[in-house]
Amino acid sequence: MFMSFHSIFTSPLSSKLAFCRLAPVLFVPIAFGGLRLSQTLCTSTNIQRRYMQPPEAKRVCADNMVPKIGTHNGTFHCDEVFACFLLRQLSEYKDAEIVRTRDPAVLATCDVVVDVGGEFDPKKHRYDHHQRVPTCNHTRMPKCRAALCYILLRSFVETFSSLCPEKPWGTRLSSAGLVYLHFGRRVLEEITQLKPDDRRLEALYDKLYENFVEEVDAVDNGISQYDGEARYAVSSTLSARVGHLNPRWNSKSQDTEEGFKQAMKMVGAEFLDRMEFYQNAWLPARAVVEGAVQMRTQVDPSGEVIVLEQGGCPWKEHLFFLEKELKVETPIKFVLYPDQSGQWRVQCVPAGLHTFQNSLHGEGRILAEASLSLLEEWRGVRDEALSTLSGIPGCVFVHASGFIGGNRTQQGALEMARRTLQAAAKARGEGKETQANGS
Ligand SMILES: *[C@@H]1O[C@H](CO)[C@@H](O)[C@H](O)[C@H]1NC(C)=O
Ligand SMILES: CC(=O)N[C@H]1CO[C@H](CO)[C@@H](O)[C@@H]1O
């Protein structure tokens, strides 16, 4: 437990000394300036500079050139299984032996240790999250500027955002998240063959934390998804399935080695599968939407309508992301795309950004209603009746809620969008609440 103090006290002391008390008996001078691991930890270049070098931790194991990844023995969990899988994707640990033990002397011979050992120290490649760590009594230490300060022992509370302030995720890390944070970019580089400065790599890195790794961190730390009582049990999470690979309480053999290997295979295959999907389906969709956003003023001078030449391309999440990324000033209101029968759809963009709190990519979140819906008088009307009503020939339908409509041609669909925009502008000009607004 006190190993973690050791690294703190050997950190360079700044001039800002404070007398702190380690509950309940230790009195030690301590420099807050020297405590912060995270400030320089995070940019991809820093991570690479620090961690792409051959691990200094190889100082041991002189008798055996095969590197060793240490983790605990006994019952295994998704987080360390996944951490071991990730490490094995790196060239330096490709053939590493996985040593499962709680014996500190054996762990000390390992090049990298995850989920055991009571220590988080990336410089030594120690990635445990179970230790209690010194924490200032009145605030988290990094922000503490008090001259006198009591230090208490608290559970390990680092999150992605506490270690990398530019990232939004506030879920306490497990050994999976710790290893992903430090090695994830390199793992993705090795597998995707994307270059370190390719911005797609960073997009994948974020996407996979938010849509794969964070769940493992949360489940491991017992953090529930929602407040309140769940309506039903979710029993098929990756973590649950790993749990089921442990020996049953009543089986004769309590050996966990075979199950651990099986779990690594399963977790690894699912991670690779997901990564492949994001690389080959999700990223290309982003590229399509980005192209459409850049062409938007050629579709309509307002810049509020985009055209996706290929239907079926998921666009909502990418559009929200790109509007921010490309600093689009007037929010895009309509997306036109062909449907399966070659007719055209005009779909309203949900005004959903505010539902994406604390999140880079809000896939699967409930979206707010459209910022601008198709004209109310068109809603629920079809075909000829709609064409007559709108004066736009070839109309197919407008959904009763107004969020989507169809025309036989792209031009017709565009006309429906334009007319809605004009009506909204007119209503704004008349200074009254527009009936075109989503109601
Ligand atoms: C774990 O390993 C230690 C020694 O490394 C051993 O004493 C202990 O019995 C093992 N525990 C389990 C549950 O296998
Ligand atoms: C306004 C407009 O272009 N509407 C089109 C809707 O679809 C029909 C059928 O293809 C076209 O004739 C219309 O011109």
Image (cartoon, rainbow, N blue to C red):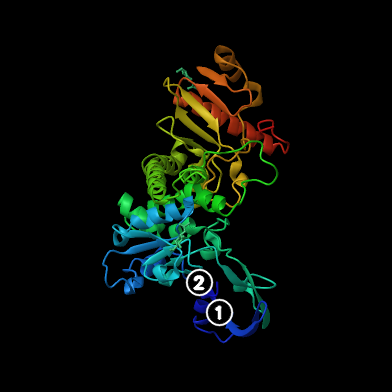
Q: Please tell me whether residue 1 is drawn above or below residue 359 in the rendered image.
A: below
Type of amino acid under label 2: Leu
Residue at x-position 51% and y-position 78%: 6
Q: Quadrant of the N terminus?
A: bottom right
Viewer-proximal residue among 427 and 7: 7
Picture quadrant where residue 140 is located = bottom right
- Residue carrying label 1: 33
Viewer-proximal residue among 81 and 226: 81
User: Where residue 32 sits in the image (x, y, percent)?
Assistant: 58, 79
Picture quadrant where residue 67 is located = bottom left
Q: Please tell me whether residue 28 is drawn above or below residue 397 in the rendered image.
A: below
Picture quadrant where residue 185 is located = bottom left
- Residue carrying label 2: 37
User: Where residue 278 sits in the image (x, y, percent)?
Assistant: 41, 43
User: Where residue 389 sits in the image (x, y, percent)?
Assistant: 61, 17
Regarding residue 405, the answer to whether it shows in the image is yes
Classed neighbour count for the residue bearing mark 1: other residues with Cα under 10 Å, few (<14), some (14–19), many (≥20): some
Type of amino acid under label 1: Gly
Q: Is residue 98 left or right of residue 293?
A: left
Mark 2 and ligand 1: say if the CB distance to the nearest ligand atom is below 8 Å.
no
Q: Is residue 70 left or right of residue 250?
A: left
Q: Secondary structure at mark 2?
A: loop
